[in-house]
Image (spheres, rainbow, N blue to C red):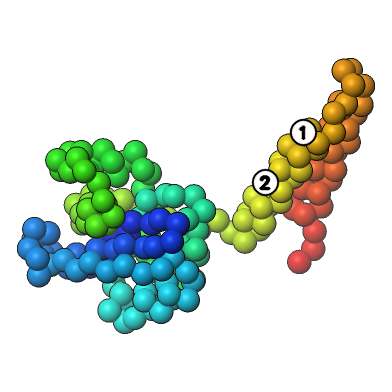
Amino acid sequence: QICGIDVSKDTLDYCVLKAQANPQSKKAQSYESLKNELPEIASEFSDAGFDHTLFVLESTGNYSSKLLHQLGKMERPVCVVSPYQSNSYMSALGMTNKNDKQAAYALSMMGQQMSLRLYKAPSEEMQKRKQMLSTLKALEKQAQSAWKFPKGCGFRDFVTELLSWKLYLLFNFRFAPE
């Protein structure tokens, strides 16, 4: 079976299509909604009824990260599609008004009718590195806006020093013993 999940900040709306069934048939579809929280996700999708299910969802940045983390932990197969890809697919189906239920249905149809690539989660090391880089970028931005350096004085030295620390941290994080 295929489970299309429309992800939003607070909720997950999903549609399950039975494999090899006519997607237009009401018996082939079921719709549910749950909170976008780890305990609810774990409780809902750890059910044995989802053991042989392909999950299809749209990439929504931070909103989909909890879902991807939990499905990966449960070793469920997941396909992540871009918003452009899903919107184009919905347009091709003639779905002009998008609501959460329709989006979930369209995502499950995509999983049933298209050959989508399975999502491979980045390693923990890559996730930590990405988090560290985004923290450093935020610090750089904060420093740039907080400290007003006189024209031609100090800021370049500060950024140079900050970047050298950034490289130092990246190098040591990458080659640090486990």
Residue behind mark 1:
145
Q: Residues within 10 Å of mark 2 (few under 14, many from 20)?
A: few
130 or 6, which lies in front? 6
Q: Is residue 131 left or right of residue 75?
A: right
Q: Amino acid at mark 1?
A: Ser
Residue at image point 19% right, 68% down = 30
Choose top left, top right, bottom left or bottom right for residue 56: bottom left
For the C terminus, which image quadrant?
A: bottom right
Residue 58, disc: none
Secondary structure beneath disc 2? helix
Q: Is residue 133 above or below residue 177?
A: above
Q: Residue furthest top?
A: 152
Specify whether residue 133 is in view.
no
Q: Is residue 103 above or below residue 46?
A: above
Residue 134 marker: 2
Whether residue 39 sits left or right of residue 11 in the image: it is right
CB contact under 8 Å: marks 2 and 1: no
Image quadrant in which you'd find residue 150: top right
Residue 61, position as x, y percentages in the image:
49, 50
